[in-house]
Image (cartoon, helix red, strand yellow):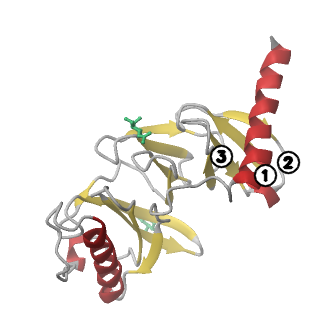
Amino acid sequence: MALQGHLWIAVNVFVFVVIFSSVTAKIKFRDDIYEPRVVSLSDGEKLEKELNRIRRESSKNNRGKMGVSDSHVEVHVNTFKNKNHKQAVVHWSGSDSNAIFLLTREVIDGVVNSSSLYRSLNYGVTFDEITPQNSVISSFFVDPNNYTKLIFADRKNRAVYVTDDEGKTLSGPHRTQFNPQRLVFNPILENVLLGYSYTQEQLFVSRDLGKTWKKLQDGADSRFF
Ligand SMILES: *[C@@H]1O[C@H](CO)[C@@H](O)[C@H](O)[C@H]1NC(C)=O
Ligand SMILES: *[C@@H]1O[C@H](CO)[C@@H](O)[C@H](O)[C@H]1NC(C)=O
């Protein structure tokens, strides 16, 4: 049995390292699923610009369908109540998605000290706060194959929060034994991902969308991640 377990891990690592790194270019990820973007909050205009960019893109994709006009949206920066949060991470998944995620954060010496998480279902006109209690979300990761699946990483408390319905429900905290600095979704196997800690050089794997983790390797080389 132990051998089989090792074999399974070996196969999985193979799938990740070889197939993922060499075939990624050939696998057609949905290229309209954007990476989260970081904007400064000290200048409210930058956030407005980003939200208006999303609005324009969405109106291109959904002309007539969702009633999104090209009109400008004014962002009321006061919505985001914590004045120490000088930075925002903004994400919209594109095409048929109508959810925008916005993570405001206080970064001290490169480390996120506090943060708040918001979701908008009307292209940035209003935001609802969905910050999990006692969390310090530092970043989040979107499944490139299925944008309804997102993982929010809390490095300070070594935990993740998981959604598979685009933030309607959020489960967690799911404790990670490692500092969840980088999460990589497997492009083929559903709900399988690698978790990597640069500081600990440890590699973990999850088969249930981040809810439980198993250590694969110590002293893992960060070149692959
Ligand atoms: C970090 O965040 C905590 C909780 O929000 C706050 O009490 C503390 O003052 C912050 N630390 C610094 C150095 O600002
Ligand atoms: C994405 O994941 C959700 C939740 O598991 C599922 O209901 C949906 O069918 C998936 N969509 C695709 C395109 O795989």
Q: Residues within 10 Å of mark 2 (few under 14, many from 20)?
A: few
Percent coordinates x, y for residue 162 in the rendering: 44, 42
Q: Which of marks 1 and 3 is nearer the N terminus?
A: 3
What whole-number distance in Å separates the C-alpha atoms at marks 3 and 2?
A: 14 Å
Q: Is residue 191 left or right of residue 95?
A: right
The answer to whether residue 57 is above or below residue 197 is below
Marks 3 and 1: in contact by CB < 8 Å?
no
Q: Which amino acid does label 3 sit on?
A: Gly
Q: Which sits earlier in the primary sequence, circle 3 or circle 2?
A: 3
Question: Can the viewer see residue 183?
Answer: yes
| x and y percentages locating residue 119 in the rendered image | 28, 58
Q: Distance between the residues labelled 2 and 1?
A: 5 Å
Q: Which amino acid does label 2 sit on?
A: Gly
Q: Name the residue under label 3.
A: 195
* SS at badge 3: strand
Q: Is residue 222 visible?
A: no
Badge 1 element: loop
Q: Which residue, given by chain and number where applicable, does mark 1 sit on?
A: 201
**Which quadrant of the rendered structure holds the C terminus?**
bottom right
Residue nearest the viewer, comparing 109 with 178: 178
**In the rendered image, which residue does mark 2 sit on?**
219
Question: Which quadrant of the structure image shows residue 66?
Answer: bottom left
Q: Earlier in the sequence, mark 2 or mark 1?
A: 1
Cβ at disc 3 under 8 Å from ligand 2:
no
Distance from disc 1 to disc 3, alpha carbons, whole Å, reads: 11 Å
- The residue lying at 59 percent from left, 40 percent from top is 176
